[in-house]
Image (spheres, grey):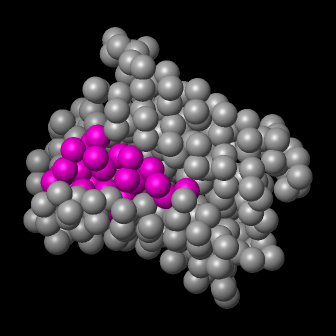
Amino acid sequence: MPRTVHVLALASALCSAGATIFIQQGLRGSGPYTGVWINLVVGTIGLWAGVLLTGGIGRLSAAGVAFFVLAGLIGTVAGRLLRFVAIEKVGASIAAALINLHPLVSTSLAILLLGERITAPILAGTVVILLGTTLLSVGGRRIGFRPWQLALPVLSATCFGVVAVLRKLGLSEMGAVLGSAINVTTALVVFTAFLLASDHREALACRGRSLVYFVAAGVAENAAVFLNVVALSVGTVSVVAPLYGTAPIFVLFLSFFFLRGVETLSGRLVLGTLLIVLGVYLITALSGR
Protein backbone atom coordinates (compact mmCIF):
# COMPACT_ATOMS: atom_id res chain seq x y z
CA MET A 1 0.00 0.00 0.00
CA PRO A 2 2.80 2.54 0.71
CA ARG A 3 4.06 2.16 -2.87
CA THR A 4 0.52 2.74 -4.15
CA VAL A 5 0.33 6.00 -2.20
CA HIS A 6 3.66 7.14 -3.63
CA VAL A 7 2.64 6.29 -7.19
CA LEU A 8 -0.73 8.06 -6.83
CA ALA A 9 0.79 11.19 -5.31
CA LEU A 10 3.55 11.41 -7.92
CA ALA A 11 1.06 10.75 -10.72
CA SER A 12 -1.04 13.60 -9.33
CA ALA A 13 1.99 15.91 -9.36
CA LEU A 14 2.81 14.89 -12.94
CA CYS A 15 -0.77 15.57 -14.07
CA SER A 16 -0.68 18.98 -12.39
CA ALA A 17 2.60 19.78 -14.15
CA GLY A 18 1.14 18.60 -17.46
CA ALA A 19 -1.83 20.93 -16.94
CA THR A 20 0.56 23.85 -16.43
CA ILE A 21 2.36 23.07 -19.71
CA PHE A 22 -0.94 22.74 -21.60
CA ILE A 23 -2.11 26.08 -20.16
CA GLN A 24 1.09 27.80 -21.30
CA GLN A 25 0.65 26.40 -24.81
CA GLY A 26 -3.03 27.35 -24.93
CA LEU A 27 -2.27 30.92 -23.87
CA ARG A 28 -0.16 31.37 -27.00
CA GLY A 29 -3.34 31.63 -29.07
CA SER A 30 -6.02 32.68 -26.60
CA GLY A 31 -6.56 34.60 -23.34
CA PRO A 32 -6.65 33.49 -19.69
CA TYR A 33 -10.42 34.10 -19.37
CA THR A 34 -11.09 31.55 -22.12
CA GLY A 35 -8.69 29.07 -20.57
CA VAL A 36 -10.30 29.29 -17.13
CA TRP A 37 -13.82 28.95 -18.56
CA ILE A 38 -12.94 25.82 -20.57
CA ASN A 39 -11.13 24.42 -17.54
CA LEU A 40 -14.27 24.87 -15.43
CA VAL A 41 -16.54 23.33 -18.09
CA VAL A 42 -14.34 20.23 -18.31
CA GLY A 43 -14.20 19.97 -14.51
CA THR A 44 -17.97 20.35 -14.11
CA ILE A 45 -18.74 17.65 -16.68
CA GLY A 46 -16.17 15.27 -15.22
CA LEU A 47 -17.17 15.70 -11.59
CA TRP A 48 -20.92 15.36 -12.13
CA ALA A 49 -20.21 12.22 -14.16
CA GLY A 50 -18.26 11.04 -11.13
CA VAL A 51 -21.21 11.83 -8.85
CA LEU A 52 -23.52 9.71 -11.01
CA LEU A 53 -21.04 6.83 -11.17
CA THR A 54 -20.59 6.83 -7.38
CA GLY A 55 -24.26 6.51 -6.48
CA GLY A 56 -25.82 9.90 -7.11
CA ILE A 57 -26.21 13.00 -4.97
CA GLY A 58 -27.20 11.29 -1.73
CA ARG A 59 -27.31 13.28 1.52
CA LEU A 60 -26.91 17.06 1.33
CA SER A 61 -25.80 19.27 4.20
CA ALA A 62 -26.48 23.01 4.22
CA ALA A 63 -23.20 23.69 6.01
CA GLY A 64 -21.29 21.43 3.63
CA VAL A 65 -22.83 23.10 0.58
CA ALA A 66 -21.96 26.53 2.00
CA PHE A 67 -18.31 25.58 2.56
CA PHE A 68 -17.93 24.16 -0.95
CA VAL A 69 -19.70 27.13 -2.56
CA LEU A 70 -17.29 29.46 -0.76
CA ALA A 71 -14.41 27.23 -1.81
CA GLY A 72 -15.60 27.53 -5.40
CA LEU A 73 -15.55 31.32 -5.24
CA ILE A 74 -12.18 31.69 -3.54
CA GLY A 75 -10.18 28.76 -4.82
CA THR A 76 -11.69 27.79 -8.14
CA VAL A 77 -12.64 31.20 -9.54
CA ALA A 78 -10.01 33.48 -8.00
CA GLY A 79 -7.27 30.87 -7.56
CA ARG A 80 -7.48 29.39 -11.06
CA LEU A 81 -7.89 32.75 -12.77
CA LEU A 82 -4.81 34.09 -11.01
CA ARG A 83 -2.99 30.90 -11.96
CA PHE A 84 -3.73 31.37 -15.66
CA VAL A 85 -2.76 35.03 -15.59
CA ALA A 86 0.42 34.20 -13.65
CA ILE A 87 1.45 31.60 -16.23
CA GLU A 88 0.82 34.15 -18.98
CA LYS A 89 2.87 36.89 -17.24
CA VAL A 90 5.80 35.08 -15.57
CA GLY A 91 5.89 31.71 -17.33
CA ALA A 92 4.95 28.16 -16.41
CA SER A 93 8.00 27.23 -14.33
CA ILE A 94 8.02 30.26 -12.03
CA ALA A 95 4.23 30.26 -11.66
CA ALA A 96 4.24 26.57 -10.71
CA ALA A 97 6.99 27.09 -8.13
CA LEU A 98 5.24 29.99 -6.38
CA ILE A 99 1.73 28.51 -6.55
CA ASN A 100 3.29 25.54 -4.77
CA LEU A 101 3.45 27.79 -1.68
CA HIS A 102 -0.17 27.02 -0.80
CA PRO A 103 0.79 24.58 2.02
CA LEU A 104 2.65 27.46 3.68
CA VAL A 105 -0.54 29.52 3.53
CA SER A 106 -2.60 26.68 5.00
CA THR A 107 -0.06 26.17 7.79
CA SER A 108 0.02 29.90 8.57
CA LEU A 109 -3.78 29.98 8.79
CA ALA A 110 -3.73 26.98 11.10
CA ILE A 111 -1.26 28.78 13.37
CA LEU A 112 -3.17 32.07 13.35
CA LEU A 113 -6.74 30.78 13.50
CA LEU A 114 -6.53 27.33 15.03
CA GLY A 115 -3.78 27.91 17.57
CA GLU A 116 -1.36 25.34 16.14
CA ARG A 117 2.22 25.75 17.30
CA ILE A 118 5.20 26.93 15.28
CA THR A 119 7.87 24.23 14.92
CA ALA A 120 11.50 24.34 13.80
CA PRO A 121 10.73 22.69 10.41
CA ILE A 122 8.08 25.36 9.73
CA LEU A 123 10.58 28.15 10.43
CA ALA A 124 13.31 26.44 8.40
CA GLY A 125 10.92 25.77 5.53
CA THR A 126 9.78 29.40 5.52
CA VAL A 127 13.38 30.67 5.34
CA VAL A 128 14.23 28.29 2.48
CA ILE A 129 11.07 29.34 0.59
CA LEU A 130 11.99 33.02 0.99
CA LEU A 131 15.45 32.30 -0.43
CA GLY A 132 13.94 30.48 -3.40
CA THR A 133 11.44 33.28 -4.03
CA THR A 134 14.24 35.86 -3.91
CA LEU A 135 16.17 33.93 -6.56
CA LEU A 136 13.10 33.82 -8.79
CA SER A 137 12.57 37.55 -8.32
CA VAL A 138 16.17 38.43 -9.21
CA GLY A 139 16.16 36.01 -12.15
CA GLY A 140 12.88 37.49 -13.38
CA ARG A 141 14.57 40.74 -14.35
CA ARG A 142 16.70 38.81 -16.84
CA ILE A 143 13.86 36.61 -18.10
CA GLY A 144 11.69 39.61 -18.92
CA PHE A 145 8.99 40.17 -16.32
CA ARG A 146 8.69 42.68 -13.51
CA PRO A 147 9.26 41.50 -9.92
CA TRP A 148 5.81 42.77 -8.80
CA GLN A 149 4.21 40.25 -11.17
CA LEU A 150 5.36 37.51 -8.80
CA ALA A 151 2.42 38.64 -6.66
CA LEU A 152 0.08 36.92 -9.14
CA PRO A 153 1.15 33.32 -8.41
CA VAL A 154 1.55 34.15 -4.71
CA LEU A 155 -2.06 35.41 -4.60
CA SER A 156 -3.13 32.23 -6.41
CA ALA A 157 -1.29 30.18 -3.78
CA THR A 158 -3.05 32.19 -1.06
CA CYS A 159 -6.44 31.35 -2.57
CA PHE A 160 -5.54 27.66 -2.79
CA GLY A 161 -4.25 27.70 0.78
CA VAL A 162 -7.48 29.24 2.10
CA VAL A 163 -9.62 26.87 0.09
CA ALA A 164 -7.82 23.85 1.56
CA VAL A 165 -9.20 24.82 4.98
CA LEU A 166 -12.71 25.38 3.56
CA ARG A 167 -12.71 22.01 1.79
CA LYS A 168 -11.54 20.28 4.93
CA LEU A 169 -14.49 21.78 6.80
CA GLY A 170 -16.84 20.82 3.96
CA LEU A 171 -15.60 17.23 3.87
CA SER A 172 -16.78 16.78 7.43
CA GLU A 173 -20.32 17.35 6.14
CA MET A 174 -20.41 15.52 2.77
CA GLY A 175 -18.41 13.35 0.37
CA ALA A 176 -15.45 14.53 -1.66
CA VAL A 177 -16.90 13.89 -5.13
CA LEU A 178 -20.22 15.66 -4.50
CA GLY A 179 -18.51 18.51 -2.67
CA SER A 180 -16.02 19.00 -5.49
CA ALA A 181 -18.88 18.98 -8.04
CA ILE A 182 -20.68 21.72 -6.09
CA ASN A 183 -17.40 23.60 -5.80
CA VAL A 184 -16.62 23.67 -9.53
CA THR A 185 -20.25 24.18 -10.60
CA THR A 186 -20.45 27.28 -8.41
CA ALA A 187 -17.28 28.54 -10.02
CA LEU A 188 -18.57 27.89 -13.54
CA VAL A 189 -21.88 29.69 -12.93
CA VAL A 190 -20.25 32.70 -11.25
CA PHE A 191 -17.42 32.99 -13.77
CA THR A 192 -19.80 32.70 -16.74
CA ALA A 193 -21.99 35.43 -15.23
CA PHE A 194 -18.90 37.60 -14.76
CA LEU A 195 -17.86 37.17 -18.41
CA LEU A 196 -21.35 38.04 -19.66
CA ALA A 197 -21.76 41.02 -17.31
CA SER A 198 -18.32 42.46 -18.08
CA ASP A 199 -18.78 42.22 -21.84
CA HIS A 200 -16.18 39.46 -22.27
CA ARG A 201 -18.49 37.19 -24.28
CA GLU A 202 -15.69 36.52 -26.76
CA ALA A 203 -13.96 34.51 -24.02
CA LEU A 204 -16.69 31.88 -24.34
CA ALA A 205 -15.51 31.01 -27.85
CA CYS A 206 -12.32 29.13 -28.64
CA ARG A 207 -11.08 27.04 -31.55
CA GLY A 208 -8.00 25.44 -33.00
CA ARG A 209 -4.97 24.41 -31.00
CA SER A 210 -5.80 26.61 -28.01
CA LEU A 211 -9.09 24.75 -27.54
CA VAL A 212 -7.29 21.40 -27.65
CA TYR A 213 -4.65 22.56 -25.18
CA PHE A 214 -7.18 24.06 -22.74
CA VAL A 215 -9.36 20.93 -22.80
CA ALA A 216 -6.25 18.81 -22.20
CA ALA A 217 -5.31 21.13 -19.32
CA GLY A 218 -8.77 20.72 -17.82
CA VAL A 219 -8.57 16.92 -18.05
CA ALA A 220 -5.05 16.88 -16.58
CA GLU A 221 -5.85 19.29 -13.75
CA ASN A 222 -9.00 17.45 -12.68
CA ALA A 223 -7.18 14.11 -12.95
CA ALA A 224 -4.53 15.56 -10.62
CA VAL A 225 -7.18 16.56 -8.09
CA PHE A 226 -8.83 13.13 -8.28
CA LEU A 227 -5.55 11.23 -7.88
CA ASN A 228 -4.60 13.46 -4.95
CA VAL A 229 -7.91 12.75 -3.20
CA VAL A 230 -7.46 9.00 -3.77
CA ALA A 231 -3.90 9.17 -2.46
CA LEU A 232 -5.10 10.96 0.69
CA SER A 233 -7.79 8.32 1.19
CA VAL A 234 -5.17 5.56 1.42
CA GLY A 235 -2.21 7.50 2.85
CA THR A 236 -1.33 10.29 5.22
CA VAL A 237 -1.04 14.00 4.46
CA SER A 238 2.60 13.96 5.60
CA VAL A 239 3.40 11.49 2.78
CA VAL A 240 1.09 12.74 0.03
CA ALA A 241 1.62 16.51 0.36
CA PRO A 242 5.43 16.51 -0.10
CA LEU A 243 5.20 14.17 -3.10
CA TYR A 244 2.47 16.29 -4.68
CA GLY A 245 4.67 19.30 -3.99
CA THR A 246 7.21 18.00 -6.52
CA ALA A 247 4.98 19.27 -9.37
CA PRO A 248 7.23 22.32 -10.09
CA ILE A 249 10.16 19.95 -10.72
CA PHE A 250 8.07 18.08 -13.29
CA VAL A 251 7.19 21.46 -14.83
CA LEU A 252 10.90 22.27 -15.21
CA PHE A 253 11.51 18.89 -16.85
CA LEU A 254 8.54 19.17 -19.21
CA SER A 255 9.34 22.82 -20.05
CA PHE A 256 12.75 21.77 -21.34
CA PHE A 257 11.11 19.48 -23.92
CA PHE A 258 7.79 21.20 -24.71
CA LEU A 259 8.33 24.92 -24.14
CA ARG A 260 11.57 25.48 -26.04
CA GLY A 261 11.50 28.92 -27.57
CA VAL A 262 8.65 29.90 -25.24
CA GLU A 263 10.34 29.82 -21.85
CA THR A 264 13.97 30.27 -20.79
CA LEU A 265 15.29 28.04 -18.00
CA SER A 266 18.09 29.76 -16.12
CA GLY A 267 20.22 28.40 -13.30
CA ARG A 268 18.58 30.79 -10.83
CA LEU A 269 15.12 29.67 -11.89
CA VAL A 270 15.99 26.01 -11.41
CA LEU A 271 17.70 26.59 -8.05
CA GLY A 272 14.89 28.85 -6.83
CA THR A 273 12.29 26.23 -7.76
CA LEU A 274 14.21 23.46 -5.99
CA LEU A 275 14.53 25.60 -2.84
CA ILE A 276 10.78 26.28 -2.79
CA VAL A 277 10.03 22.56 -3.19
CA LEU A 278 12.47 21.80 -0.35
CA GLY A 279 10.84 24.45 1.86
CA VAL A 280 7.37 23.03 1.21
CA TYR A 281 8.72 19.56 2.03
CA LEU A 282 10.07 20.78 5.37
CA ILE A 283 6.72 22.32 6.27
CA THR A 284 4.45 19.46 5.13
CA ALA A 285 6.52 16.37 5.91
CA LEU A 286 8.44 17.37 9.04
CA SER A 287 6.32 19.99 10.79
CA GLY A 288 4.66 17.42 13.06
CA ARG A 289 7.89 15.82 14.22
Residue 142 position, x and y percent, is: 89, 52
For residue 148, say whether it is visible: yes
Query: For residue 212, which quarter of the picture?
Result: bottom right
For residue 166, say whether it is visible: no
Residue 240 position, x and y percent, is: 30, 50
118 falls in the magenta region: no
Residue 160 position, x and y percent, is: 48, 41
Kindly identify the residue that appears in the image at 61 percent across and 64 percent down. Answer: 252
Query: For residue 254, which quarter of the picture?
Result: bottom right
Magenta span dominant secondary structure: helix
Left/right of residue 25 with respect to residue 52 in the rendered view: right
Q: Measured along the vertical axis of the image, is residue 252 above or below residue 279?
A: below
**Nearer to us in this view, 244 or 127:** 127
Left/right of residue 110 with respect to residue 34 in the rendered view: left
Kindly identify the residue that appears in the image at 11 percent across and 54 percent down. Answer: 58
Q: Measured along the vertical axis of the image, is residue 190 above or below residue 1?
A: above
Left/right of residue 3 with respect to residue 163 in the rendered view: left
Q: Which residues are magenta?
A: 225-248
**Nearer to us in this view, 104 or 75:** 104
Q: How many numbered circles does the render carry?
A: 0
Kindly identify the residue that appears in the image at 28 percent across and 37 percent down. Answer: 168
Left/right of residue 222 with respect to residue 195 in the rendered view: left
Residue 116 position, x and y percent, is: 33, 16
247 falls in the magenta region: yes
Location of the C terminus by quadrant is top left
